[in-house]
Amino acid sequence: MPYGLVLNLIPRSLLSQSNLKSNLSGRHLHALFLELVNSVDLELAIHLHQ
């Protein structure tokens, strides 16, 4: 069972400073994480979201 996870994310296009702050908030990163988990294990994603 992994204890940590490192995601190296590369944007498909350049982000301006204003977009960078609004699009990479904690909520967006949390949603991305849950979406990645959901693609592998739906029940776990639902459990983590609660």
Image (cartoon, rainbow, N blue to C red):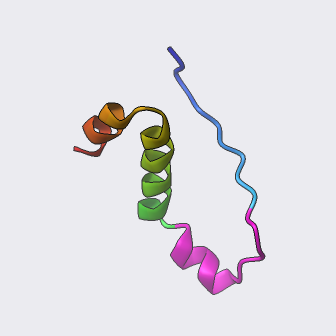
Q: Is residue 12 a member of the stretch shown in magenta?
A: yes
Q: Residue at x 77, y 76 (%)?
A: 14
In this rendering, is residue 8 above or below 10?
above
Q: Position of residue 25 (x, y in %)?
A: 49, 67
Q: Nearer the viewer, residue 25 or 49?
A: 49
Q: Residue at x 35, y 39 (%)?
A: 45
In this rendering, is residue 33 above or below 28?
above
Of all residues shown, which one is farthest toward the top? 1
Of all residues shown, which one is farthest toward the left? 50
29 left or right, relative to 7: left
Q: Residue at x 46, y 49 (%)?
A: 35
Q: Quadrant of residue 18?
A: bottom right
Query: What are the residue bounds of the magenta stretch?
Result: 11-24
49 left or right, relative to 30: left
Q: Is residue 17 a member of the stretch shown in magenta?
A: yes
Q: Position of residue 43 (x, y in %)?
A: 30, 33
Q: Residue at x 64, y 37 (%)?
A: 6
How many marks are shown on the rendered structure? 0
Q: Quadrant of residue 16?
A: bottom right
Q: Nearer the viewer, residue 35 or 24?
A: 35
The quadrant in which the C terminus is found is top left
Q: Position of residue 27 (x, y in %)?
A: 41, 62
Q: Position of residue 40 (x, y in %)?
A: 48, 34
Q: Quadrant of residue 48?
A: top left
Q: Nearer the viewer, residue 19 or 45?
A: 45
